[in-house]
Amino acid sequence: MEKEILQLLHENAKLTPKQIATMLGVTEKEVRAKIKELEERKAIIKYHTLINWEKTEYEPVRALIEVKVTPQREVGFDGIARRIYQFDEVKDVYLMSGDYDLAVMVEGSSMKEVALFVALKLSTIEGVQSCATHFILKTYKHEGVILDDEEEDKRLVITP
Amino acid sequence: MSLEEKINPVLRQIPPSGIRKFFDLVANTKGVISLGVGEPDFVTPWYIREEGIYSLEKGYTMYTSNQGLLELREEISRYLLRLTGIVYDPVQEVLVTVGVSEGVDLALRALVSPGDEVLIPEPSYVSYGPTTMLAGGKPVYIRTRPENGFKLTPELLEGVITPKSKILLLCYPNNPTGAVMTADDLAKLLPVIAEHDLLVISDEIYAELTYEGKHVSIASFPGMKERTVILNGFSKAFAMTGWRLGYAAGPKEIIAAMTKIHQYTMLCAPITAQKAAIEALRNQNGAVKKMVEEYNYRRRILVEAFSEMGLRLFEPKGAFYAFPDISATGLSSEEFAEKLLFEEKVAVVPGSAFGPSGEGFIRISYATARKDLIEALKRIKRFVRKKTLKKQ
């Protein structure tokens, strides 16, 4: 039941415990208890809304920064990652295998703002060797959701 | 002699599909949520579509052998073993058809002699009766009831048998009722089938859409493989209706007879669909499971909504149909469907389209996006309340 509840809420956080209970064939009470437990142990961290910003007038500028760093004694990559992820401009930070070390998603209101943030804040952190900035031009799919307009139902209206 | 008189007289006895008339009504109404669609609302999973595209790029645009690509028949054989526990020889006991529709036609034409009776549980899928008549047989309908969960019982079966009875045509999980037959239910039929030496055509197209327990094929009982033709296909489980691809599995003598008709009338199933189907069976990546899970969610939403409405609904356990009893509204199936369409813009299929025993019922397909289904159920609820109040 836990996995199903998580999947359903992941897909639509607005589902009520009653609706989930109906779909899973269990009681509302059981669902409420399970959700509470998941929240308490921080398996469910928060409920957020997936927005296609391109359809609004507030579309932010996002860039993926490839960061190469020199790992530090005792803390390895974590120390630098911590210094980076504290910035509000930074939305995601991943430790990567391959050519570079940290993948950092930065958001700002203009290209200039993002570029300046990288130049002045990111690249000047001690231990950061280099930053390569890649601006995101279009989002096709985010968190498993295709952002193109929903395809219409092409089926005949009545079939046997 | 007029042209009309020159048309095959058997065809004149066959009434036009009851769905057709209603289709025109719905198609001409705007803003309708349709719960009348007998096919998945999902498009074919991309990994399957992509394989079809790839096969076209590689130039696979030719005929295949009559029986279908051997590679596909081997995959089907393995799949049937997983699904039913029965071993079918891909070389002699499997035939790839153009959908189950062709499979039904081939099986009936291969087995029916003039005047033979084909026993069909009713309410039934719309094509079994007409296909039987075109094959020269006589359809004999067995009225199943919601009290029995629309299952076929040995008593009901025994009740229609005559010396001319030859074939029992089963479809479980069932369209239009959503009924399933469990292993116990099927086992009870076996003595009657054996005593009267019946052949069985078992349309198992909805097998993957079984929500409680596992699908059981009647062919899996001892002695039954020898007298059963299983029909199945890719339309429902893999959301591949438009690809038109199905298959038959059965005793080699019957498959050979069916293949003979198939080779003269159809030659082979389309190669693009066959290529895509190989991939569908080979790389089961959870896409089917996810679709089945979603249908199951909707099924439960629907059952609860009807219990709140106070309409009697036997709980559907398979396929993606529910068959509620609407007689409490005082309306006939057709009146209900028409008024619901005009007053609330929700399309359902009158139960009477599936035979006289469907009168007093409607068929609801829950192969409809969850949010649309919920909205449609809200409208049906409002409609039913209005009608039952008026009646009192």
Image (cartoon, helix red, strand yellow):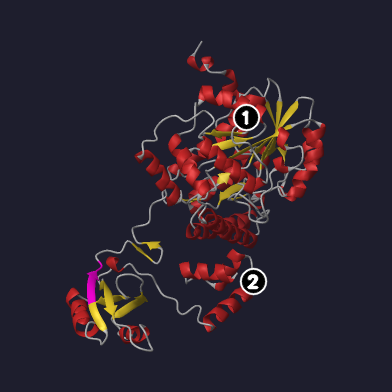
Question: Within 10 angstroms of label 2, few (less than 14), some, or many (20 or more) residues?
Answer: few
Residue B384 in the image, given as x and y percentages of width and height: 59, 56
Question: Within 10 angstroms of label 1, few (less than 14), some, or many (20 or more) residues?
Answer: many
Residue A156 in the image, given as x and y percentages of width and height: 45, 43
Distance Cα–Cα, label 2 vs label 1: 49 Å
- The three-letter amino acid code for the residue at tag 2 is Thr
Q: For the C terminus of chain B, give its image quadrant.
A: bottom right
Q: Is residue B240 visible?
A: no
Q: Circle 1 — which element?
A: helix
- The three-letter amino acid code for the residue at tag 1 is Ile
Residue A145 sits above or below residue B265 on the image:
below
Q: Circle 2 — which element?
A: loop
In which image quadrant can residue A150 be found? Answer: bottom left
Name of the residue lying farthest toward the bottom: A74
Q: Main secondary structure of the magenta part?
A: strand
Residue B194 in the image, given as x and y percentages of width and height: 80, 34
Residue B252 sits above or below residue B310 on the image:
above
Say which residue appears at 39% left-offset and 33% top-offset.
Answer: B61
Q: Which is nearer the eye, A156 or B191?
A: B191
What chain does badge 2 belong to? A
Q: Which mark is residue B255?
A: 1
Say which residue appears at 53% left-offset and 24% top-offset.
Answer: B263
Residue B73 in the image, given as x and y percentages of width and height: 55, 38
Q: Which is nearer the eye, B282 or B292?
A: B282
Which residue, given by chain and number where applicable, does mark 2 sit on?
A: A27
Q: Is A133 within the magenta?
A: yes
- Which residues lie in the magenta part? A131-136
Q: Which is nearer the eye, B159 or A81?
A: A81
Nearer to us of marks 2 and 1 is: 1
